[in-house]
Amino acid sequence: MDRLKKQLDEVVDYFKEELAGIRIGRASAGLVENLEVDYYGSKSKVKQIAQISLPDSRTILISPWNKDDLVNIEKAINESDLNLNPNNNGEAVILNMPPMTEERREDLVKLVGAKAEEARVKIRQIREEKLDDLSAQKKESKLSEDEFFSKKEEVQKRVDKYNQKIDQIRENKENEIRTI
């Protein structure tokens, strides 16, 4: 059961990370902090090679520790799916967030729904694996009939709890998208 909880927590954490990268019309460090940047021949995340700050609600300021990395950060942003134009002033990369249209907001709500469904599918897969494991234990006589149904019920309760978490996170993100 501890392994089940760990796996379900990982799904929820991954879902939160995915949603952090969705642009909602206002500046957020989560949009750029995990972008992969070419850093001396290897890939590093922006948050590892630069300071990310938010001077106002529509601006992201990325100040690398080494000014030579400005070009690589700019390139990573251009190659990402953020659809933002980075401005390099020689000291930092500046990203200005354009206001979002109603159509774009609805597209993002659909994207959040799709990401939530992906998370629920992963949770169902984990549940099926655990139930298969319990069935195998029952067949090998490691679990009695009562223990099997008790554990099966416990697995379903945990899955339901985590599905509720996913739905709550999805709802919050959708409301955030619609109200900005």
Image (spheres, helix red, strand yellow):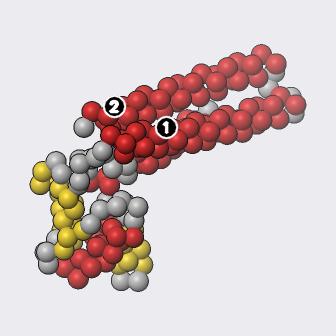
Q: Is residue 125 above or below residue 90?
A: above
Asked if one can make out residue 115 in the rendered structure from this viewpoint, the answer is yes
Give the residue at mark 1: 113
Quarter of the image that includes the C terminus: top left
Farthest residue, direction top: 146
- Please name whichever residue, 132 or 174, is drawn nearer the observer in this view of the structure: 174
Quadrant location of residue 60?
Answer: bottom left
Q: Which quadrant holds residue 80? A: bottom left
Q: Is residue 44 left or right of residue 161?
A: left
- Of 140 and 43, the residue lying toward us: 43
Residue 120 left/right relative to 40: right
Residue nearer the viewer, 89 or 179: 179
Horizontal side, residue 168 vs residue 141: left or right: left
Give the left or right position of residue 113, taking residue 30 as reference: right
- Image quarter where the N terminus lies is top right
Q: Give the x, y percent position of residue 100.
A: 28, 46
Q: Is residue 101 above or below residue 165?
A: below
Looking at the rendered structure, the secondary structure element under dot 2 is helix
The percent coordinates of residue 119 (x first, y second) are: 55, 40
Q: Give, as a three-letter code, the residue at label 1.
A: Gly
Amino acid type, mark 2: Asn
Q: Residue at x 27, y 66 (%)?
A: 85
Secondary structure at numbered mark 1:
helix
Q: Which residue carries the number 2 mark?
A: 175
Residue ID at (47%, 29%): 167
On the image, the x and y values in percent for residue 128 come to 72, 35
Residue 44 visible in the snapshot = no
The structure residue drawn at horizontal position 40% and vertical position 39%, both measured from the top left corner, is 106
